[in-house]
Image (tube, helix red, strand yellow):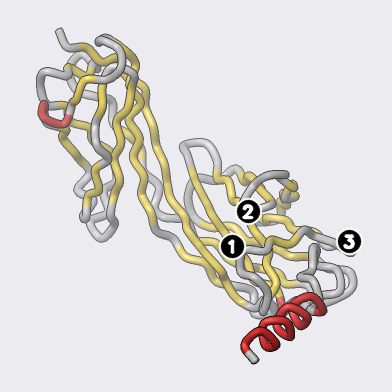
Amino acid sequence: MKRALVVLSMLFLGCADPPPDDTAGLSTNDLSLQILVETNEEATTARIGIYALGHDRYHRLWLGGGDRLVARVGDRTFEAEEVDGSLAGYTVKVPITDGSFELDLLRTGSSSARATRIDLPPAFALSPPAGDGLVHLERPFTLQWTPAVASSSMRATLAGPCVVAAERTLSADTGTFTWSVADFGHGATPAPCTVTIALHRPGGQVTLAPELAGVQLFRAQQVRAIGLWATRS
């Protein structure tokens, strides 16, 4: 009896309709989005995945049937480009570092979904390092930025071939962080070397166009990075 049930299950799975490969023929309210946003000091890049409601949540769709995905900042539009091999599928860059922009799914055979609004986390700027601007690995190093947002968390990384430092997460953004000497482990090569220090501020929010089914994943962050010379002398 158990063997018969297994055979029937295999037959059922073999006859099931394959998941769709693109958006052609799907109604707009069957589509959900994955939106990953990263902003640096020059621009914002959004990576967007499109998925079909009711199918494997990891089965990405391509645009089909003449459908287009564009970002809007005021009256300027920016066409999303297909990225082969990307988990998201599409990417678009807009020339803003603060505020918000909108995503439009423009369709020819079904209703379009306009004005999915993306609000970015608050922007910030790194302050020039104090003193000689070097990272002296045998003494504490402090980095500052403005403006601080106390309600936000912050992630700080410091990496280079001559130093190993663990990633640090700040539960409250005070506008400053100090690495202690104990944070600076020896890297694969001796000092001096160039290290990259990066700060990541998560946050923001998405307001989805009502025609869409939902948001599968949303993540946005402001990222600022600086390269400095590090020495142990």
User: Disc 2 vs disc 1: Cβ atoms closer than 8 Å?
Assistant: yes
CA distance for labels 2 and 1:
7 Å
> What's the residue type where badge 1 is placed?
Gln
Quadrant including the C terminus: top left
Q: Which residue is mark 3?
A: 66
Q: Dot 1, crowdedness within 10 Å: few (<14), some or many (≥20)?
A: many
For mark 2, give the secondary structure.
Answer: loop
Pair 3/1: label in front: 1
Q: Which residue is mark 1?
A: 34
Q: Position of residue 47 (x, y in %)?
A: 61, 51
Whichever of callouts 3 and 2 sits on the residue coming sooner in the sequence is 3
Residue in view at x 67 percent, y 67 percent? 51
Q: Residue furthest bottom?
A: 1
Q: Position of residue 80 (x, y in %)?
A: 72, 50
CA distance for labels 3 and 2:
19 Å
Whichever of callouts 2 and 1 sits on the residue coming sooner in the sequence is 1
Q: Position of residue 66 (x, y in %)?
A: 89, 61
> What's the residue type where badge 2 is placed?
Ala
CA distance for labels 3 and 1:
20 Å
Residue in view at x 11 percent, y 26 percent? 181
